[in-house]
Image (cartoon, rainbow, N blue to C red):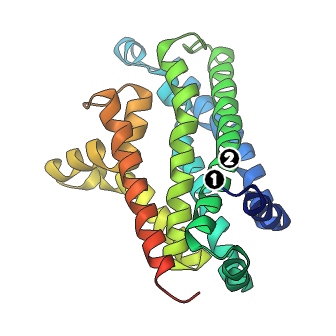
Amino acid sequence: MIDAGVLRAEWTKFSSITATMVLSLATFAVSGAFGWLFSQAAANQYTSATPQERLDFQPLDMGMRGLFIAQLLVAALGVLVASSEYGSGTMRASVAAVGRRGRLVAAKAWLTALTALPVSVAGIWLMYVVSQTTLATGGAPYTMPGDPGALRMLLLGPVVFTLLALFGLALGLLLRGTAAAVNVSTAFLLLPIFATASPDLVRHFISTYWPNMAAFQTVSGTSELPAWAGSGILAGFVAVMLIAAFVRFKNRDV
């Protein structure tokens, strides 16, 4: 059970760090900016597209490409929940104040989820509204909120982002440094993009089973896996990362 006092203390530390608040606002702003940027480019392409290209046009996928950028910011937000204390030297005091390390890790995980979820909802919903409005204004097809794909994106997308924030938290606890953890999370999350130049077998494996890609393809409805499997891969991976972070945090000096 999470101690309310510990959770309040974690929130006080989180909200007092300028970088975390700026990063939360940046996630929202970047989501809107990239929603407009990618959908504007897609609308321009649609006007000069061939009949077959127009038939193949996927407005939701085209407009929500900015998710691959926004995910980096959400993961970095999770990193800061842990790494900021190592940077400021307050982690030892936090451990002494709480007493039980498991309780401290649980409080940080809850804080990460409770912070990342509303940020993710705001960012993804803004990206959707901006992107589909821009497509409609540009004369391209667009997706209405009641569409099954749009509903899946709006409801499950924030959950995926929240899991990625917990992934960032785990890296922050494991690596104990903001720069190292952010660099590793960025490389990990962007690997599927760079893997497009890999051999077919490797590319197929990464695009299907890499944790964030498996979840994003489930959300977009393009996954070869059952809906539960794609999301389950990411959830299971994050759970393993958090367990590893807890074990290492429990058994080493801070």
Secondary structure under badge 1?
A: helix
Residue 221 position by quadrant: top left
Q: Residue 5 location, x and y as percent?
A: 78, 60
| Above or below for 209 versus 82 | above
- Give the residue at the far left of this rendering: 201
Q: Which numbered disc covers residue 110? A: 1
Q: How many marks?
A: 2
| Above or below for 21 versus 64 | below
The 10 Å Cα crowd at callout 1, few under 14, some 14 to 19, many 20 or more, is some
Q: Residue 148 location, x and y as percent?
A: 48, 14
Q: Are marks 2 and 1 in contact (CB under 8 Å)?
A: yes
- At label 2, which amino acid type do we have? Leu
At 56% from the left and 79% from the top, the residue drawn is 176
Task: Look at the image and tell me in which quarter the C terminus lies.
Answer: bottom right
Q: Which numbered disc covers residue 152? A: none
Q: Which numbered disc covers residue 114? A: 2
Secondary structure under badge 2?
A: helix
The 10 Å Cα crowd at callout 2, few under 14, some 14 to 19, many 20 or more, is few
- At label 1, which amino acid type do we have? Trp
At 56% from the left and 29% from the top, the residue drawn is 63
- Give the residue at the far bottom of this rendering: 253
CA distance separating discs 2 and 1: 6 Å
At 73% from the left and 63% from the top, the residue drawn is 6
**Left or right position of 230 against 142:** left
At 77% from the left and 63% from the top, the residue drawn is 14
Residue closest to the eye, 193 or 206: 206
